[in-house]
Amino acid sequence: MGKFLPVRRKLGMVEDASSLRSVPAAGNTWEAAVSTRGTLTPERRADKRAEQATALAGAEAEQWETRIQRLARSRDAVILAHNYQRPEIQDVADHVGDSLALSRIAATSRASTIVFCGVHFMAETAKILSSDKTVLIPDPKAGCSLADTITAEQLREWKAEHPGAAVVAYVNTSAAVKAEADVCCTSSNAADVVQSIPVDQEILFLPDQFLGAHIRRVTGRANIHVWAGECHVHAGINGATLKARVAAEPDAELFIHPECGCATSALYLAGTGVVPTERVKVLSTGGMVDAAQRTSAHKVLVATETGMLHQLRAANPRTVFEPVSDRAQCRYMKMITADKLLRCLTEGVAEVTVPADIAARARQAVQRMIAIGSPTRGGE
Ligand code: 13P
Ligand code: SF4
């Protein structure tokens, strides 16, 4: 698959646990080596601990990485990390990618355990696709503000107002919402998914309003109703912020995630010639990595969560990648820390489960999603 950078592959995913040295239990060097004080929230304290741990000397970082890899082998686990994860998590993972690429890997991996370093709906999607596998997430509280904007009950009410409409649910939704959908999509294949639905059939697209508006634009369809949800991180990257950055960097290329509040402004800048059209790219996070490998631009301004920069800089060291907003950080993605990943692999927590009836109904919509769109394509 070309949509993720396989930063590191283990030598053998299936390894006889008996051939491995026993691994010390949690209560590890990371936790022992750092101390926290003050009035921080528990989540922020965990973030701080990981930041400090990451700053530790290289030898300890190597020791941590070796332990993670050994534990993963002994559990027959594959570690998947989303592009927004902390750099040390991305670097230790077997696969790093966008939601679609990671779903596809989860569906086809031969490992019996999937450790999902991302947010809860991503781990749930992996479980829906692989009900026979154990799916672990290092912090089950890693949620998503966008997924929280619609419940299954609200969707049922919306469907009742539009009988006969096809329901397209972005993957950033709970399993219960997916169970009410006809097909899921990610930012990478949303246009393809919408185009697979007969042109005269109404569509309910949820929950992201900016992605919905973008899909309306690229497909030219007027019969798409869009739920008014948004992601607090991407909505915060607004048109004014983008325009100010473009004014300061008129020669830079723009990589824009379609969930961004500035997606419309970016296309307006292109449409009015402020930035040449070929320099404005609306892309999923995996599409950004593909585009980074291809670009010869001196500088690219990136409108998405700042964790993305780690993969972009690794993909192309010749180009300078800068965030449109350095405040665009998803606190949920950042809940997955070095010490929590170690604990997850040591203790086998936290297991992600989806009730069988909900999983069965959601599976159809998710399987349709992974079947649509080319695995090697970055965006629409
Ligand atoms: P991608 O599907 O582009 O990886 O995005 C997922 C996400 O959560 C964006 O905020
Ligand atoms: Fe959800 Fe936004 Fe975080 Fe993506 S960046 S996981 S949409 S809260």
Image (cartoon, rainbow, N blue to C red):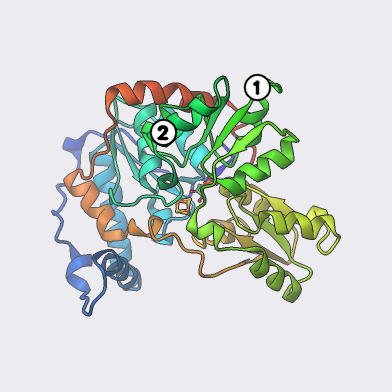
- Residue 89 in the image: state x and y as whole percent: 38, 56
Residue 380 visible (yes or no)? no
Observer-nearest of 248 and 130: 248
| Disc 2 within 8 angstroms of ligand 2 (CB) | no
Question: Which residue has dot 2 on it?
Answer: 177
The structure residue drawn at horizontal position 28% and vertical position 51%, both measured from the top left corner, is 139
Q: Which mark is residue 201?
A: 1
Judge by depth and name the residue closer to the eye, 122 or 66.
122
Along the horizontal axis of the image, is 21 left or right of 295?
left
* Disc 1 residue type (three-letter): Gln
Name the disc covering residue 45, or none. Answer: none
In terms of depth relative to the viewer, which is nearer, 188 or 106? 188
Is the residue marked by circle 2 packed among few (<14), some (14-19), or many (20+) residues within 10 Å?
many
On screen, residue 270 above or below 131: below
Q: Earlier in the sequence, mark 1 or mark 2?
A: 2
Q: Position of residue 203 (x, y in %)?
A: 61, 29
- Secondary structure beneath dot 2 equals helix
Quadrant holding the C terminus: top right
For mark 1, does the 10 Å Cα neighbourhood hold few (<14), some (14 to 19), or many (20 or more) residues?
few
From the Cβ of disc 1, is ligand 1 less than 8 Å away?
no
Find numbered disc 1 in the image and state the secondary structure of the residue it sits on. Answer: loop
Task: Check contact, mark 1 vs mark 2: CB within 8 A.
Answer: no
Q: Mark 2: which amino acid?
A: Val
| Res 284 visible | yes
